[in-house]
């Protein structure tokens, strides 16, 4: 974009062409703009998990300190992955460039950058595939849509594969089911062969590998923080909860993203779990070793993701639990649902999950033996096992954001809505094109939720925020509920920029607020320790 | 640029056929040898493609889910958009293949200023469907040239196709539809800037080729009529592997046949293979039952992990002082 | 006819021309999409900009509520502040309004009093420009504030417990930055 020295007259100004040069996309090298990319990973993180090419470098630098044979490594990497993944091989071949996906990407909608069209994002790598792996590309070069793999091309990959949140919205609309997430994953695997991941992703990976969770929290810190939540719960309800850690012989192991243990507003969701499980008298345990449901390894390579997820089954086996309950999280559930059993199964040392409260057998999870907490809670409500007072959430007008991974990689739509409708009196859906399988990403998924790329995140999240703004203006919505830890953190920020009147919470925070516990004192505060509006005037209605 | 290049290539192909047949008299080459090569290339090329795809395994179970999962018995499961079993997958795939279900999602109407406005993308779905249906019908119709007597169902198709009963011979709708749909797809590709931006010569070339094939076909049937009996003699000769070129078939027929041969040859090496690929797409052809039934990755290999023992080794003292149970005191 | 009437009569033309000029600051290959796709949710950027400039022009012609004007300015600048434009380009849309209006009433500019009114109108636009600088800066500052807030939110409990334990040697030291999990 041209820069004007001083404001000229309107006439002069209109003559300035701000449009980028009309070059073919292959001939338009990427420009790294501050605010749109993440910082390069520090070498220590790579070393901790034995990743190649650990060195100090910066993504804004000219020289990325790649190994001399970087090109060979990449081409070899492509070849290897074409053989291992049918999705990759197929998606390289069958795109007809119909453009149906073009305007489905939230980054495209928010930025207008043509390389954010899913089809073009895939062409970045497809063009190289044609050059080195197809006859037409070898013979006819650019005429066949092929191009050389150059340093600039590699940088372009890096830039744009870290502008995709692997949300799969495009794959819903593609007539052949081409899933850009698959292509981005392959792109990122290739990037990792040269040790070029971001600090924001590699830090959590390294932490999680050795310490069990992304933040690198040690066992005693985890316990202390959960106990602090119990202090708050005691203040709100008068009930003391004593959760257990690494306890052998428990019936259920509970695994949740560590963001819920320490970050706002995730901790309120976590307090909701603690209260619910206590009220049920559930025989469950936390683990400090398997203390992370999320998996940033998935944003580096399939192998790293597998290495991190080893802990879940291993810990379940060591503790001798019967089955595993998983907290609210997006990419965690994509992985638990579609990958965990394949990586580390069969989990034949566990039993088919059965709710000890309702007796419901979760047949749909009979192999993986892991149940989503909203499936578990919806079942409780259905069987009338919870005493709920939705009026405690009356000050909230709630809408629900479907998280990408649980929507398009699982299909969990009704369970959270069922719960919300039983714990809240005011629930409003966002417009149809922006929810369920067509939901818009928060713009920060797949490891893009760093601080330095805030501008990019605000762009990518705009389509989502725009729909929230609509229900805020139309129905006075002031709370955006969701079942994802990244959402809880990232949507909070997104709302503060676009729709500051709307706050963000997990579904189980709403449950915790509405849950009438045996022997609790009259609630005057919600889980955020904020006064419940109008509670003084009310007579004792709870516990009917 | 890609567009012009493709156009030039198609025009050149037409000229080559005309020149070859009219000037040099290479009827046998264009009428017999090239068509045989083309059909063989098509068959083996497609086999090679599909085998190559199926040689790459599906390591993970990655369907794209577009509806409610099958979970609790009282929650209404979306059996087609998010199938949990084979039957659901078959229906989902059938909707995808015959009705372009995913493209149809673009069909969106909304109320704007009190008027119902449709998203322009419904045209892509409609044109895409019209294009493929008519292409398929035209292809099937042509089988009558390779069978004697003509099977009954081909006559039925012809009579349905010609239901308008206008013109002599009867106007067959699908031929015209094919041409119009291809023209629409071309115009759309040029008119919408972001689609033009992503377009390659490989996108224009097949469109031009098909437009040329449909045009020559229509020319032959309705305008510069060729001797249909002689054409059938030729095609039956090809089908019975006793090739024979009767005299006096118009050059335009050879142009038509040559372009079709080019299409057949080009097919397996181009994006047109999406025809076969869609059946193999793992985001569509898998049931969403990965928690019910374990999906096996054939190349699953052991990875380096951080075991609990190593973890406890590092944190034992801290765990003990925080009253967290440990394995080794 | 005075300027206000002239502009009111041609409102639709002005809005359309103005909108087109603004959209021209986006890559040509995608501008078409922003321009033509009318759906509020499938084209949030185009829709918001169109709505905002319509609102701005309405308010300029028939002032009713300065808060409304601010909110329209805000909704367009909030978008342009995060789209990688330099400040001058991000706020250029107000200059473009001047141009469109001048072009539109060229024929009538000589009419009685219109030229004078035009000056007045342009001063009004200049006023909006001043306000826009503030909004733009506030948006940019907000971005930095959000990064800082987020880092704090993500490690909220850690910081809290660190305070509680300030006498203890067990204070947790996150390695310089708060990583999210998720």
Image: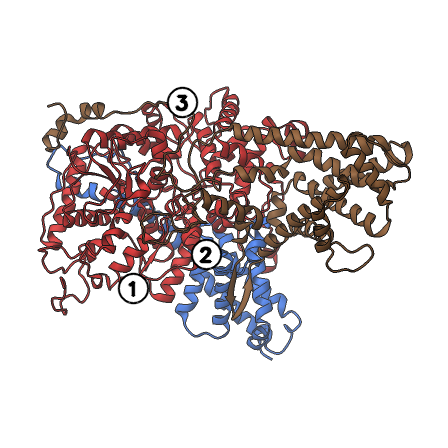
Chain colours: A red, B brown, C blue
Label 2: how many Cα within 10 Å (few below 14, some 14–19, many 20+): some
| Position of the N terminus of chain C by quadrant | bottom right
Letter of the chain that mark 2 sits on in the rendering: A
Q: Position of residue A424 (x, y in %)?
A: 26, 61
Residue A394: which quarter of the image? bottom left
Image point (50%, 49%), residue name: A104
Image point (11%, 60%), residue name: A522
SS for callout 3: loop
Label 3: how many Cα within 10 Å (few below 14, some 14–19, many 20+): some
| 3D distance between C-alphas at marks 2 and 1 | 21 Å
Q: Position of residue A260 (x, y in %)?
A: 25, 44
SS for callout 1: loop
Who is closer to the viewer here, B225 or B114? B225
Q: Which residue is mark 3?
A: A52
Who is closer to the viewer here, A506 or B23? B23
| 3D distance between C-alphas at marks 3 and 1 | 52 Å
Residue C22: which quarter of the image? bottom right
Q: Which residue is mark 2?
A: A433
Image point (29%, 64%), residue name: A426
């Amino acid at each position: 974009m041209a820069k004007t020295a001083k404001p000229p007259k309107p006439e002069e100004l209109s003559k300035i062409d701000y449009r980028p040069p009309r070059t073919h996309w292959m001939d338009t090298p990427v420009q790294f703009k501050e605010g749109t990319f993440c910082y390069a990973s520090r070498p220590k993180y790579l070393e901790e998990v034995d990743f190649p090419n650990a060195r100090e470098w910066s993504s804004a630098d000219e020289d990325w300190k790649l190994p001399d044979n970087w090109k060979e490594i990449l081409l070899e990497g492509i070849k290897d992955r074409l053989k291992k993944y049918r999705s990759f091989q197929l998606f390289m071949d069958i795109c007809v460039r119909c453009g149906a996906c073009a305007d489905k990407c939230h980054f495209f909608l928010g930025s207008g950058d043509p390389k954010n069209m899913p089809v073009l994002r895939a062409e970045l790598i497809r063009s190289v595939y044609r050059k080195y792996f197809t006859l037409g590309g070898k013979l006819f070069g650019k005429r066949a849509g092929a191009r050389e793999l150059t340093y600039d091309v590699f940088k372009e990959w890096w830039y744009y594969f870290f502008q995709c949140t692997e949300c799969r919205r495009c794959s819903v609309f593609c007539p052949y089911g081409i899933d850009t997430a698959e292509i981005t994953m392959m792109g990122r695997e290739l990037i990792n062969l040269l040790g070029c991941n971001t600090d924001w992703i590699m830090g959590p990976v390294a932490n999680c590998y050795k310490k069990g969770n992304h933040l690198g929290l040690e066992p005693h810190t985890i316990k202390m923080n959960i106990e602090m939540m119990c202090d708050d719960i005691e203040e709100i309800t008068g009930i003391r909860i004593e959760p257990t850690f690494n306890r052998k012989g428990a019936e259920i192991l509970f695994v949740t993203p560590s963001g819920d243990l320490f970050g706002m507003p995730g901790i309120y969701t976590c307090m909701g779990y603690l209260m619910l499980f206590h009220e049920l008298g559930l025989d469950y345990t936390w683990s400090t070793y398997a203390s992370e449901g999320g998996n940033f390894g998935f944003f580096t390579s399939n192998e790293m993701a597998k290495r991190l997820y080893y802990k879940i089954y291993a810990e379940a086996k060591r503790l001798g639990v019967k089955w595993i309950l998983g907290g609210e999280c997006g990419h965690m559930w994509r992985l638990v649902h579609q990958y965990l059993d394949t990586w580390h199964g069969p989990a034949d040392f566990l039993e088919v999950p059965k709710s000890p409260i309702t007796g419901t057998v979760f047949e749909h999870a009979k192999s993986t033996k892991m149940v989503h907490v909203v499936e578990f809670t919806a079942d409780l409500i259905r069987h009338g096992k919870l005493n709920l007072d939705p009026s405690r959430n009356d000050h909230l007008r709630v809408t629900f954001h479907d998280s990408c991974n649980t929507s398009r990689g699982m299909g969990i739509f009704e369970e959270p809505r069922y719960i919300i409708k039983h714990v809240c009196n005011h629930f409003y859906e966002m417009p149809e094109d922006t929810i369920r399988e067509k939901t818009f990403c928060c713009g920060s998924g797949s490891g893009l939720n760093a601080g330095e790329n805030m501008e990019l995140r605000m762009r990518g999240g705009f389509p989502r925020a725009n729909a929230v703004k609509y229900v805020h203006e139309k129905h006075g919505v002031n709370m955006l509920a969701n079942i994802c830890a990244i959402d809880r953190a990232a949507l909070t920020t997104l709302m503060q920029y676009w729709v500051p009147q709307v706050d963000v919470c997990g579904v189980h925070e709403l449950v915790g607020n509405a849950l009438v516990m045996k022997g609790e004192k009259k609630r005057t505060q919600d889980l955020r320790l904020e006064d419940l509006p109008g509670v003084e005037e009310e007579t004792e209605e709870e516990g009917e | 640029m890609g567009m012009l290049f493709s156009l030039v290539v198609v025009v050149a192909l037409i000229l080559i056929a005309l020149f070859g047949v009219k000037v040099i008299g290479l009827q046998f080459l264009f009428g017999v040898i090239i068509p045989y090569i083309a059909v063989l290339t098509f068959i083996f090329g497609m086999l090679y493609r599909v085998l190559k795809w199926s040689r790459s395994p599906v390591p993970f179970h990655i369907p794209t889910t577009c509806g409610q999962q099958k979970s609790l018995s009282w929650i209404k499961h979306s059996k087609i958009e998010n199938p949990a079993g084979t039957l659901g997958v078959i229906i989902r795939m059938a909707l995808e293949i015959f009705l372009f279900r995913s493209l149809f999602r673009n069909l969106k109407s909304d109320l704007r200023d009190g008027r119902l406005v449709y998203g322009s993308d419904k045209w892509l779905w409609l044109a895409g469907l019209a294009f493929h249906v008519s292409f398929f019908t035209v292809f099937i119709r042509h089988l009558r040239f390779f069978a004697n007597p003509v099977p009954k169902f081909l006559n039925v198709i012809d009579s349905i196709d010609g239901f308008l009963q206008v013109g002599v011979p009867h106007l067959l709708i699908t031929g015209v539809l094919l041409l119009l749909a291809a023209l629409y797809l071309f115009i759309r590709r040029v008119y919408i800037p972001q689609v033009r931006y992503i377009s390659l010569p490989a996108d224009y070339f097949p469109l031009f080729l098909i437009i040329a094939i449909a045009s020559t076909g229509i020319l032959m049937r309705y305008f510069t009529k060729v001797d249909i009996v002689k054409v059938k003699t030729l095609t039956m000769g090809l089908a019975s592997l006793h090739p024979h070129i009767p005299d006096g078939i118009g050059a335009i027929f050879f142009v038509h046949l040559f372009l079709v041969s080019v299409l057949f040859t080009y097919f397996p090496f181009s994006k047109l293979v999406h025809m076969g690929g869609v059946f193999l797409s793992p985001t569509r052809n898998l049931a969403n039952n990965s928690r019910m039934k374990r999906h096996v990755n054939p190349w699953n290999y052991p990875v380096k992990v951080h075991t609990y023992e190593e973890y406890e080794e590092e944190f034992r003292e801290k765990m003990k002082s925080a009253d967290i149970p440990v394995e080794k005191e | 006819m005075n300027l206000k009437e002239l502009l009111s009569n041609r409102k639709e033309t002005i809005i359309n021309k103005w909108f087109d000029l603004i959209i021209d600051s986006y890559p040509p290959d995608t501008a078409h999409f922003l321009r033509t796709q009318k759906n509020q949710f499938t084209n949030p950027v185009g829709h918001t900009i169109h709505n905002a400039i319509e609102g701005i022009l309405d308010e300029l012609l028939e002032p009713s509520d300065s808060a409304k004007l601010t909110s329209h300015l805000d909704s367009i600048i909030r978008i342009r502040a995060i789209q990688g434009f330099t400040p001058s380009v991000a706020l250029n849309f107000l200059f473009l309004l001047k141009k469109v209006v001048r072009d539109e009433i060229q024929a009538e500019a000589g009419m009685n009093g219109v030229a004078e009114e035009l000056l007045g109108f342009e001063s009004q636009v200049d006023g909006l420009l001043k306000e826009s600088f503030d909004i733009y800066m506030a948006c940019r500052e907000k971005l930095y504030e959000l990064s800082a807030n987020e880092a704090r939110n993500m490690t909220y409990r850690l910081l809290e417990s660190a305070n509680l334990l300030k006498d203890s040697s067990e204070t947790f030291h996150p390695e310089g930055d708060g990583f999210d999990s998720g």
